[in-house]
Amino acid sequence: MKEELLQVNNLKIYYPVSSKQIGKKEYVKAVDDVSFRVKRGEVFGIVGESGCGKSTLGRGICKLEEPDFGKVLLEGEDISKYNSRQMQPVRKKVQMIFQDPYASLNPRMSVYDIIAEPLIIHRLTRNQDELKERVYGLLKKVGLDEYHARRYPHEFSGGQRQRIGIARALAVEPRLIIADEPVSALDVSIQAQVLNLLNQLKKEFSLTYLFIAHDLSVVEHISDRVGVMYLGNFVEEGPKEMLYCNPLHPYTQALLSAVPVPDPLKKRERIILEGNIPSALNPPAGCKFHSRCPRCMEHCSSQVPKQYEVEPGHFVSCHLYEGNNKFIK
Ligand code: SF4
C-alpha cells in the first residue's frame, strides 16, 4: 500500500460578494466541502467545466487562496492554518505549474534567473558554480539547452515557456506538483510533448501530481485516478479505467459522450446538456446538477445526494445509486 501524500478534508473556499439587500451576506461557494486523498507517486486528475472550482481547489491546497474551512494535510502535516512564514518550508514541497506560460514567467528576468530564483530563496546551492550547474541540469531535464539560459521568455514558443515553468517548479525538488491546466494554452502537437515530459519527469523524480484540466482526453492520458467536479463538489471519483469505461454520474456520462473516439465503429451517443452551469452564488437546491440532468427524478431538486461506492474505489454522488450500493457518506 502506497503512503498518502496529500489529504484534503471538507475543504471550503467561499468568496463574499456585496449584496444590495442590507444585512444579507452572500457567498460564491467556489469549493464546497471537498475531500480526497492522493497517494505518493500517484497522478490525481481533476476535471470539470470552467467555473466548477477546480483551479480554486488547486490554489487552496497550496494556499494561494485561503481556505475558509477544512484541512489540508501534506505528509500528515496540517498546513491549512499556516501563515506565510510557516508556509515557506512547505513551498519547497509543493510547487505549481500554471495554465498560461505567457503570463507565469517574469518577462524582465532571463531564463537563468527564473530557474535560479527558487534555488537561491530556499538556499539549495552553496556557491555560484553549483547554482549554474543546477540551472543547466534542469534545462537539460526539460529538453532545453544551456544557451537558452541567457534568453528572455518572449524569445520562446508556448511549449518552450511551459518547459521553463516546469524546470522552475522542479528546481526545489518538490514532492507534489499542482499542474493547473498546464497544456490548455498549447497547440495539440505540443500538448502531447509536454504531457510526455511530465510523465517522464514523474518517473525520474518520483513526483506526485494533482493535474487539473477541462479536457477529459488530456486527464485520461496522464492520471491514475480522476475526480469529476461540478459547482464546487466532486460528483464522481475513481480509478481512471473504471471512470472512463463505466461512468456512473449523468454529468460524467455527458462529458465523456462529447469526447471523440478514434474508432468510427465505436460511436458514442452524444448527450447534450441543456443550459449553462448555474451560478455558484445561488446553486440549485438538492442535487446541484438537477437543473441540467437528463435523468432528474422528483426528489433530486430537494434532497442532496449521498456518496456511494459502486465498485471498489469508485464513488458517485447521485440518487440513482441509492439502495443497492454501499453507503459511504
Ligand atoms: Fe441527476 Fe438526480 Fe443523479 Fe442529480 S441525483 S445527477 S439530478 S439523477
Image (cartoon, rainbow, N blue to C red):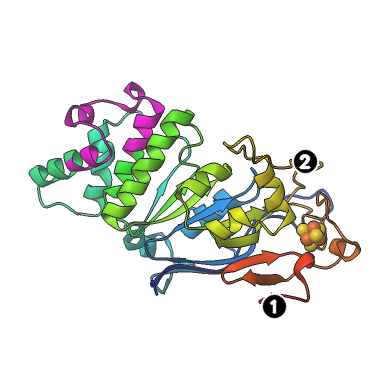
* Quadrant position of the C terminus in the picture: bottom right
Crowd rating for badge 1 (residues with CA inside 10 Å; few <14, some 14–19, many 20+): some
107 shown above or below 283: above
Mark 1 lies on a secondary structure that is strand
Magenta residue check for 170: no
The CA span between labels 1 and 2 is 30 Å
**Ligand 1 located in image quadrant:** bottom right
Task: Quadrant for residue 322, please give it.
Answer: bottom right
Q: Most extreme residue toward the front, as rendered?
A: 265
Q: Does the residue at mark 1 contact the one at mark 2 (Cβ under 8 Å)? A: no
Q: Earlier in the sequence, mark 1 or mark 2?
A: 2
271 sits to left or right of 183: right
Report the span colored magenta: 137-164
- Residue situated furthest right in the rendering: 298
Q: Position of residue 130 (x, y in %)?
A: 11, 46
Report the side of 238 relative to 102 (left or right).
right
Whether residue 65 is visible: no
Q: Residue at x 14, y 40 (%)?
A: 132
Magenta stretch, main secondary structure, is helix
Mark 2 CB within 8 Å of ligand 1: no
Identified at 24% across, 42% down, the residue is 141
> Crowding at label 2, few (<14), some or many (≥20) Cα neighbours within 10 Å?
few
Mark 1: amino acid: Phe
Q: Is residue 248 above or below residue 261?
A: below
Q: Nearer the viewer, residue 317 or 97?
A: 317
Which residue bears the numbered disc 2?
Answer: 272
Kind of residue at disc 2: Ile
Instruction: Quickly name the residue at label 1.
Output: 327
> What is the x, y in percent for residue 23?
81, 59
Residue, x 30% and y 43% (percent of image)? 168
| Residue 157 in magenta stretch | yes
Image location (x, y in percent) of residue 299:
88, 66
